[in-house]
Image (cartoon, helix red, strand yellow):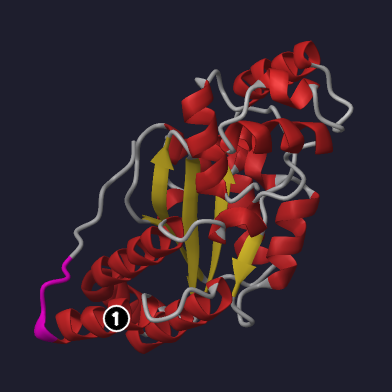
Amino acid sequence: MLNRPELPINTPANSQMLGDFVFELYSDESLDKRFKLFEKYIQKLGFDSASYTLIPNIVLNGSVDISPIFLSSSLFSQSFIDQYIEDRFDHRDFTIRAIKDGHLYPMIWQESMHWDYLTDDEKHVLFLAKEEHGIKNGISLPVQGDQYGMAGFSVLSSANDHQFQYLKAERIGILNVYAKAFNNAISSNAGAPSMFTPNLLTNKEEAVLRYVLEGKTMADIGKSNEGISRRYAEKILLNLRKKFGGLTTHQLIAHVVRLGLL
């Protein structure tokens, strides 16, 4: 069972900081600068570092088998990220399963170790994070779980138990709002998520999608110098719709634009 934490955020200091954060967040469209801004503000709250990843449904449904790609602070445990990628911890990450089950609220790693909800493999990943990579306190912040895919933050703290209990009780709410604001900002910026979705399309798939985006027909591509017949283009488009989860052509185009794949 998952226990939803209380999320107090409505204090004058929190409101002022949030306003400043959102203003600065939308003042620059650079993904890297926005993430550094997020890092600066969570450190103001007393947390140490963070990592962020976006996993599109095309990866979640197994159509393309790639490990998640992370955007992370310099102080975040790189050794943990390296092992996460190498050993494909995404297949035993309780946060990913929780998002699929509709749980979009903060989850404390060490508390999660005692939940019956977690499998032994999921608990082992958290054990490794603490014992082999020195992560004392970790927080998962799911910020997206929809038809496009899922996204979330991991935020770390080296605070002692007493200090961390204070951070959790008083500041996890505003931390969660910062995380959602960041995700909303990059989601509204066409192409920004593209760093998380490399090599999802073949050259022929890209060619077909470009023709569709330009309002052209499969007959048009058959008459072009792309080397793709009309019938083959139609087959590619049908397979793309299946590959991305059984979408209509309209939904597929929206998805491709949303993820910045072209």
Predominant secondary structure, magenta span? loop
Q: Position of residue 182 (x, y in %)?
A: 40, 66
Q: Position of residue 71 (x, y in %)?
A: 61, 67
Q: Is residue 99 above or below residue 31?
A: above
Residue 172: quarter of image: bottom left
Residue drawn at point x = 20 percent, y = 62 percent: 7
Closer-to-camera residue (66/112)? 66
Closer-to-camera residue (39/117)? 39
In the image, residue 11 lies in the stretch drawn in magenta: yes
In the image, residue 25 lies in the stretch drawn in magenta: no
Residue drawn at point x = 44 percent, y = 33 percent: 147
Q: Which residue is mark 1?
A: 23
Residue 246: quarter of image: top right
Amino acid type shown at disc 1: Phe
Q: Tag 1, which secondary structure?
A: helix
Horizontal side of 187 relative to 171 (left or right) equals right
Residue drawn at point x = 73 percent, y = 50 percent: 198
Q: Is residue 63 above or below residue 133?
A: above
Residue 101 visible to an observer of this rendering = yes
Q: Position of residue 89 (x, y in %)?
A: 68, 46
Query: In the image, which residues are magenta?
Result: 8-12
For the N terminus, the image quarter is top left
Crowd rating for badge 1 (residues with CA inside 10 Å; few <14, some 14–19, many 20+): few
Count of numbered circles in the view: 1
Residue 119 visible to an observer of this rendering = no
Q: Position of residue 36 (x, y in %)?
A: 51, 81
Horizontal side of 96 relative to 141 (left or right) equals right
Q: Is residue 231 above or below residue 248?
A: above
